[in-house]
Amino acid sequence: MELWPRTQSGSKTQVARQAVEQRDSELIIDAGRGEFVDRNGIPLTGQSIEALALFPVQAGQRGGAEQISRLASILDVSVQQLQSRLTELKEPGYWLEAGSTHPLALTERQLEALKTVHINGVRVVPYRLRYMAPYLASQTIGYISQHPERIKTAYGHEYAIGELKLNSVIGGAGLERSLDRLLRGDGGTTASYYTDASGQPLQGLDVRVAAPVNRLYPLQVITTLDAGLQAAVEQYADRSGLKEGAIVVLDMATRDIVTMVSRPRLNPEQVDAAGSAAANHAIRAVEPGSIFKLVTEAAALEAGVSMPSETFHCSGEYGRYGLSDWKAGGHGELTLREGLAKSCNIVFATIAERLTARQLADTAFRLGIGRQVGWHSEQSVGPLAGPIRLLEEEEAGRIFDRKQASVDGGVMAQTGIGQRDVRISPLQAANMIATIVNMGHVAEPRIVSEIRYANGQRLVSFPPHEAASPIGRISPAAARELMDGMQLVVKVGTGRSIQNGVWDAAGKSGTAEVTRSGVDRVNQWFIGYGPLKFPKYAIAVLAENRTPNTANEATKLFRAILDIAAKKQ
């Protein structure tokens, strides 16, 4: 065990590992920050524990050797270690859990034993943990951090009037950041231990706790997440060995995000802001591979350059641009619908070359691709001065590189199969599936439904939003054909391995060729929905940075996740 360490300065964003801010002789035991719960009120942040607070006192004023020895035994540390830490103490702190960065949660046995210990400057206090293992949806919830540069730029007024200091803790990422102005609440609860000018305890005062008088705080953020499903999906993903990637599960009817998983796993108490774990891979746009063929087919159908029954011949080679099919020797004769089912590159390169760049890009936009689709408002929402975007870090992705001087046949062919410059996020991919199933109706996936005061009264709501484009939406006829094609993917195509499950399913697989640090890798995808008769969920699974020519891990995960969701109904 060790004492809570002081935050060290540096050029990077500093992470306040257990959300404890220390002020002279005061120790914050509850920051008063708003908490997050799932759609059913299950806590996603916030846990009350009993912790051991240590306050600096003058040397020799702690107490007798017998009391020190008893405390060391209760804490399972040596007397020498305890005495050393107490002597070195310059400001209030906590005993930390071994190997962790937050205060030790005292057990009932320890609490009972501590009743017989009387040491000056050592007291049991209630403490509010911000984050709780296993840290569900950690990248979505985000983390809090010290960020002096951002306080100066984004919180200039609060800094100028002294409400915030440069070392104040603010939202660093995720919802902690986008809702920070509300979450900071009305002040924290502090514990103070009184000593005189020489550091000797003032008898009779002991520890005093000061709390805000405003009973409306802290606020409670009601997310759309389902904690039970989130936990089950995260556990399965980890057991299956998903090292890098994301999973998004949307409620088909409401577009609410019920599960959002990002890997690598993030511990919000130990954040490397520059590392991959801090990024939310569910809203980061990457190479999509063949899942983009849904967009290409929709564009071809809408433009009238092909039809589902058109027959193509695939010999395995396109004959130009160095483009080949994934199946050696090709697929032979097949229709457009069969081309989607078997993910034939030759079919989709052919129809992509018949399209203009504008036709393809416009269709993608109508499907919610190439733009941010998460819930946002350009106007003020309740006490939040607009504009606001709940998922601030969401990437819009792209279809073509804007720096591209011209779009020739080769660019169109490669783009049509989801390669070259195309970038899509898992959130966009799941929302595209929901858009297709809803006959082209695009809506903004929502992660927060409302925020309430501590007494349960509603402060602000975030109503469902449409995400209609000014250029219209895809036709119901095109949407139905895409659904038929995705059903064929599972029946006879690249998704045959997911046929047997609790719910029948439809979807589209994808494998994108990528390069990471000069090494050839692949992004594996599977996106789809289920059950077929009354679709309940749209799901996108991304397994990133995988070894080429390995089984599609995303397909396996999709089947398991849909089964987990079905069993929880």
Image (spheres, helix red, strand yellow):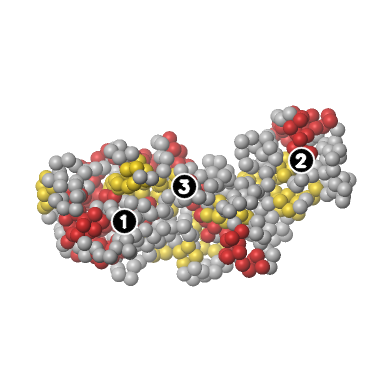
Can residue 442 be spotted in the picture?
yes
Asked if labels 3 and 2 touch by Cβ distance under 8 angstroms, the answer is no
Circle 2 Cα neighbour tier, 10 Å, few/some/many (<14 / 14–19 / ≥20): few
Mark 1 sits on what residue? 422
Q: Which quadrant does the C terminus fall into?
A: top left
- Which residue was labeled with disc 3? 276
Name the residue located 68 percent from the left edge and 68 percent from the top edge.
Answer: 161
Q: Are the residues flagged by discs 1 and 3 in contact, CB closer than 8 Å? A: no
Quick check: 43 left or right of 239? right
Q: Amino acid at mark 1?
A: Val
User: Where in the figure is residue 356, as x and y percent of width and height?
Assistant: 21, 65
Mark 1 or mark 2: name the one nearer the start of the chain. Answer: 2
Q: Is residue 197 left or right of residue 262?
A: right
Kind of residue indicated by mark 3: Ser
What residue sits 14% from the left and 51% below the top?
A: 319
Residue 144 screen position, x and y as percent: 58, 53
The spot of residue 466 in percent (x, y) is 39, 65
Q: Quadrant of residue 425?
A: bottom left
C-alpha distance separating marks 1 and 2: 57 Å
